[in-house]
Amino acid sequence: MLLQNKTAVIYGAGGAIGHAVARTFAREGARLFLTGRTLSKAEVLAKEIVADGGVAEAAQVNALDENAVAEHLDTVIEKAGGVDISFNAVGLRNTTLQGVPLVDLDVEEFMRPVNEHVRANFLTARLAGRHMVANGAGVIMTVTSLPSRIANPLMGGVALAMAAEEALIRDLSVELAPYGVRVAGVRTQAMPDSGTIEEVFGIHAKAHGITREQFQAMVAERTHRKRLPSLQEMAEVVTFIASDRAAGIAGTMANMSLGAIPD
């Protein structure tokens, strides 16, 4: 198994991305510590994983709260002896910020994805990185989306946040790699089996005056395979990069655009 004897912390485990990655990590033998802003979804997921023979426990952690993240990480280290993988799957909380022209957005609405999403990624990565550097090993990961690299209309501050997270990945990598810590991520095209993407597609479809199904087909048509990736396909790539078999991957984003953008 790819992650046998690995301890992984997943932030935002209750969301679609966190759920898919957690189930795949568990399948590959990782011991999981699942967190979420609310406890219920992470608890349900942990119980499912344990029922399937995996090892997982859940905790309520607000990834925007530095003290909460630090206290939970200390608990994980005390229980497991260390952290091998830190994966941030914290989602954007307010998708309604999309679908509005930039010139009509309030500055606070524009900056919210940066102030929340980028902050959460920085806090979790920084705290995990400190421990991993001391231990001489570890992997820090996150997921971004195509607007980090290409111009799409009506994205609000989301594209800025995704681009900032990719810059953070590169900068963390160049600083932490000499100490044995790999930092990387996955940049994926929209995954329609995610409830968030279904809602986002609806917002953009309304702004374009078409149906959600028509908008999804339009986005899929831009890919080489004329379809969009699935959550499970994303989770498989994340799991491989988190494993020791991907030791040569650092400071970069795996391109899961299905050919929509070159890399």
Image (cartoon, rainbow, N blue to C red):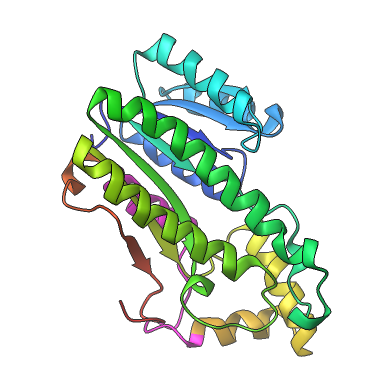
In the picture shown, does residue 252 fall above or below 150? above
Residue at left 69%, top 27%? 39
Question: Where's residue 226, x and y in %?
Answer: 44, 83
In the picture shown, does residue 233 fall above or below 120? below
In the picture shown, does residue 235 fall above or below 191? above
Q: Is residue 183 left or right of residue 192?
A: left
Residue at left 41%, top 16%? 77
Report the front residue among 125 and 232. Answer: 125
Furthest residue toward top? 78
Residue 54 visible somewhere in the drawing: yes
Residue at left 43%, top 60%? 166
Residue 210 visible somewhere in the drawing: no
**Image quarter for residue 106?**
bottom right
Question: Per the image, is 166 magenta?
Answer: no
Q: Is residue 233 left or right of residue 160?
A: left
Q: Quadrant of the N terminus?
A: top left
Question: Where's residue 14, x and y in %?
Answer: 62, 39
In the picture shown, does residue 17 fall above or below 50? below
Q: Quadrant of the C terminus?
A: bottom left
Furthest residue toward front? 175
Q: Is residue 214 left or right of residue 17?
A: right
**Image quarter for residue 135?**
top left
Residue at left 61%, top 51%? 117
Q: Which residues are magenta?
A: 221-242
Question: Per the image, is 237 magenta?
Answer: yes
Question: Where's residue 214, x and y in %?
Answer: 66, 86
Report the front residue among 20 and 35. Answer: 35
Question: Where's residue 30, x and y in %?
Answer: 34, 28
